[in-house]
Amino acid sequence: MTRDDKDDLRDMRNTCENPDDKKLLRKVIDHIAALEARLFAVRVHAKSIIVECSPKSNPTNHEED
């Protein structure tokens, strides 16, 4: 989600009159943030794995004569 999307959700939450709807929207926003953080962590780990598996960056992968 973009920053504008998040701001729109927060605005929607703030304009809701029903307390149950506000609570639900707060939970939705929190879950989205948690999922985005996990996705970021997966991307970081995936990049690390790619770098570790790269033959250029692996010093123990020397060819023997």
Image (tube, rainbow, N blue to C red):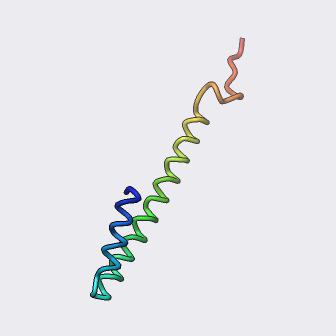
Q: Quadrant of residue 51?
A: top right
Residue at point 34%, 73% (across, down) = 11
Q: 59 or 14: which is nearer to us? A: 14
Q: Position of residue 63 (x, y in %)?
A: 68, 17
When the figure is inspected, residue 33 is found, relative to residue 57, above or below; the finding is below
Q: 50 or 7: which is nearer to us? A: 7
Q: Quadrant of residue 53?
A: top right
Is 24 displayed left or right of 53 in the figure? left
Q: 19 or 43: which is nearer to us? A: 19
> How many numbered callouts?
0
Most extreme residue toward the top, as rendered? 65
Q: 11 or 43: which is nearer to us? A: 11
Residue at point 49%, 59% (across, down) = 37
Query: Where is the N terminus found, in terms of image quarters?
Result: bottom left
Is 22 displayed left or right of 51 in the figure? left
Q: Position of residue 23 (x, y in %)?
A: 36, 83
Residue at point 28%, 82% (across, down) = 16
Is 14 displayed left or right of 50 in the figure? left
Q: Quadrant of residue 55?
A: top right
When the figure is inspected, residue 56 is found, relative to residue 35, above or below; the finding is above
When the figure is inspected, residue 65 is found, relative to residue 26, above or below; the finding is above
Q: Position of residue 13 (x, y in %)?
A: 33, 77
Residue at point 37%, 72% (across, down) = 10
Q: Position of residue 17 (x, y in %)?
A: 28, 86
Query: Where is the C terminus found, in terms of image quarters?
Result: top right
